[in-house]
Image (spheres, rainbow, N blue to C red):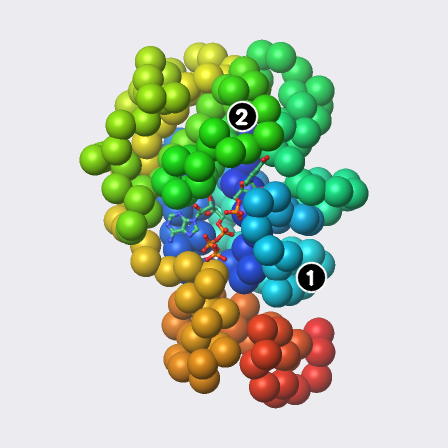
Amino acid sequence: MPDLSVFYGGTFDPIHDGHLAIACAARDALAAQVRLMPAADPPHRAPPGASAEHRARMLDLAVAGEPGLVVDRRELLRDGPSYTIETLRQLRAEFGPAQPLALLVGADSFLDLPQWREWRSLFDLAHFVVAERPGSPLEAERIPFAAGRETASVDCLRQAPAGRVYRLRQPLQAESASQVRARIAAGEPWRELVPPAVAAYIERHGLYGVALTGASV
Ligand SMILES: Nc1ncnc2c1ncn2[C@@H]1O[C@H](COP(=O)(O)OP(=O)(O)OP(=O)(O)O)[C@@H](O)[C@H]1O
Ligand SMILES: O=C(O)c1ccc[n+]([C@@H]2O[C@H](COP(=O)([O-])O)[C@@H](O)[C@H]2O)c1
């Protein structure tokens, strides 16, 4: 059976423990490498608080020592908004028409899918692996655009190149990047929301308005 290639796109402003937990849960459930792919210029949101390079370097620190997680900088090499349809077309050209590809997204992102550029075509190019998230009760929601696509079988994802929706059942993770930024701005405790190396990086570089603590790396 062919390998499954899993891509996890995000703003990661900054990466937090919730991101890392769902990346690890997807790696384990799908027995696949997960490539974390920072968006250079994420569509449909205000510009990030940290530069793309800082966000990518925090990802490098977060995945160091985590087997099966890698950082993929391909969206940083493109100008303009980081539309997923363009990324998937690039991946298809690179991997060929038969390779199973999957996008890992949180439930809130998935429920917003009809706002994404050329969203219907995304299903022609990749599967979706959807991680549940507090505040986005997927169970309770009818998702008309997922009808007929859902599968609980990882083998199904490996047997087709694209088009299925798989729900990742993992312990819910409450962390969000906006919570990290808001706590920093309010002078409240925030370090426990991110990996220790990421907390140290934020402090060294004075990101998100945190007080600078030492020399840069
Ligand atoms: N705690 C979480 N549980 C499940 N999915 C998550 C969680 N945090 C982020 N995600 C998902 O990871 C992807 C990237 O998220 P993103 O980088 O925007 O982080 P965020 O915490 O949602 O950021 P912000 O609070 O700034 O909106 C999105 O698909 C999002 O739904
Ligand atoms: O292509 C789009 O129109 C589109 C719209 C919104 C979000 N996305 C992608 O979805 C991923 C999660 O987005 P975000 O804003 O929650 O970090 C990230 O890879 C974005 O580039 C993509």
Mark 2: secondary structure: helix
Q: Amino acid at mark 2?
A: Trp
For label 2, the residue is 119
Q: With 21 as the anchor, is 65 left or right in this view?
A: right
Query: Residue 71 or 190: which is nearer the viewer?
Result: 190
Q: Are marks 1 and 2 in contact (CB under 8 Å)?
A: no
Instruction: Name the residue tied to disc 1.
Output: 51
Residue 27 x, y percent position in the rendering: 43, 39
Q: Give the mark nearer the N terminus: 1 vs 2.
A: 1
**From the Cβ of disc 2, is ligand 2 less than 8 Å away?**
yes
- Which of the 4 quarters of the picture holds residue 78? top right
| Labels 1, 2: front one | 2
| Residue at point 62%, 47% (across, down) | 42
Give residue 197's quadrant in the image.
bottom right
Does 182 appear above or below 52? Answer: below
Local crowd size for mark 2, using a 10 Å CA cut-off: few (<14), some (14–19), many (≥20): some
Residue under the point 39% across and 72% down: 192
Inspect this view and state whether residue 209 appears.
yes
Residue situated in front as seen by the camera: 154 or 202: 202
Tell me the number on the disc at residue 153. Answer: none
For label 1, the SS is loop
Q: CA distance from mark 1 to mark 2?
A: 27 Å
Residue nearest the observer in this picture, 142 or 132 = 142
Above or below for 30 versus 195: above
Q: Amino acid at mark 1?
A: Ser
Q: Residue at x 59, y 24 (%)?
A: 118
Mark 1 Cα-neighbour bin, 10 Å: few <14, some 14–19, many ≥20: some
Residue 199, how many percent across, how many down?
A: 52, 73
Residue 3 in sight in this render? no
Q: Residue at x 29, y 51 (%)?
A: 134
Instruction: Give the percent coordinates (x, y) of residue 216.
Output: 71, 78
